[in-house]
């Protein structure tokens, strides 16, 4: 039943043409970066901005808008003898699948053409996981608020927090307590933001840990190990599951 409803959601997403425009945007930017840079490694470094900033923003805003645009369809599904869990998970799978495929075609094809190695695969893995994470967060924001404007506003505020404000708060904390050993605290703080975690993981793959300041050595010792890589991917999966679980819990109790 989940896959059957997800097919209708996916068809609705493709009909909006936004996913196609997103795919073309990612492909043109990625392809242009590889064409302009003689060193493919520098193009990968430039793609970090796309993966860490644009992908979470588009995933949040697009998923939120798509949820509210599907509200009549969701209400129709709830009049049928279908479990609410099936309805929400079908919406999530349909939207997350379309965004994931858009990312893999838009960024994945140029990366496979010009930089198909461990670094390129790490970039695609982090981008795909961030897509799933921020789609989950968008579902939580949308389910919590019935009003469309308020839901989109909440999604944008969450993006500002994770992409911009959180880094400032962490830097303020580190500089305030610079006389104390904060290496372990820095590891914990990086796990509380999926964008930060993805950034650290990718920068270590690119061997530019020196750009991360005095905590770079600590990050390299932990996240550069095999356990650190598994930890990063595991934490990102937890970031995907917890907001989705909270959204599902709220949706079951919601009066629609």
Image (cartoon, helix red, strand yellow):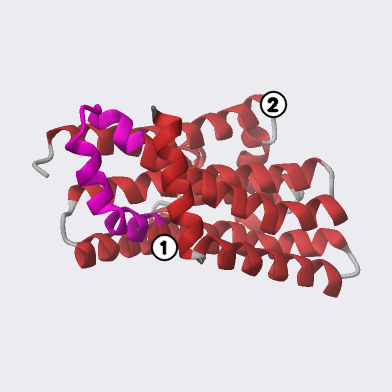
The quadrant in which the N terminus is found is: top left
The picture quadrant where one finds residue 219 is top right
Q: Position of residue 247 (x, y in %)?
A: 27, 39
Provide the major secondary structure of the magenta segment: helix
Range of residues picked out in magenta? 63-89
- Which residue corresponds to mark 1? 168
Looking at the image, residue 171 lies above or below residue 206: below
Residue 157, visible in the rendered structure: yes
- In the visual, does 61 lie left or right of 142? right
- Which residue corresponds to mark 2? 226
Looking at the image, residue 148 lies above or below residue 140: below
The local crowd at label 2, few if under 14, some if 14 to 19, many if 20 or more residues have their Cα within 10 Å, is few
Q: Tally the marks.
A: 2
Instruction: Give the label, 1 or 2, closer to the camera.
Output: 2
Query: Is residue 65 covered in magenta?
Result: yes
**Residue at position x 50%, y 37% from top?**
236
Mark 1 vs 2, N-terminal side: 1
* Residue 55: mark: none
């Amino acid at each position: 039943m989940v896959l059957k409803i997800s097919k209708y959601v996916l068809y609705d997403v493709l009909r909006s043409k936004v996913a196609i425009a997103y795919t073309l945007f990612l492909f043109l930017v990625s392809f242009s970066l590889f064409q302009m840079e003689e060193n493919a490694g520098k193009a990968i470094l430039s793609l970090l901005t796309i993966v860490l900033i644009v992908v979470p923003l588009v995933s949040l805003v697009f998923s939120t808008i798509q949820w509210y645009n599907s509200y009549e369809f969701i209400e129709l599904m709830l009049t049928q003898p279908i479990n609410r869990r099936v309805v929400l998970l079908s919406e999530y799978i349909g939207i997350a699948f379309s965004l994931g495929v858009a990312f893999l075609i838009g960024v994945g094809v140029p990366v496979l053409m010009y930089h198909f190695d461990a670094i390129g695969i790490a970039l695609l893995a982090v981008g795909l996981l961030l897509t799933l994470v921020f789609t989950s967060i968008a579902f939580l924001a949308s389910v919590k608020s019935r009003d469309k404007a308020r839901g989109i506003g909440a999604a944008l505020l969450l993006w500002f927090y994770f992409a911009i404000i959180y880094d400032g708060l962490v830097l303020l904390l580190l500089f305030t307590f610079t006389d104390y050993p904060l290496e372990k605290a820095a590891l914990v703080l990086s796990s509380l933001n999926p964008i930060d975690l993805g950034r650290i993981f990718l920068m270590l793959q690119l061997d530019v840990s020196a750009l991360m300041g005095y905590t770079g050595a600590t990050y390299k010792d932990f996240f550069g190990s095999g356990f650190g890589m598994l930890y990063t991917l595991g934490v990102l999966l937890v970031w995907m599951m917890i907001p989705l679980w909270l959204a599902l819990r709220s949706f079951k109790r919601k009066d629609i």
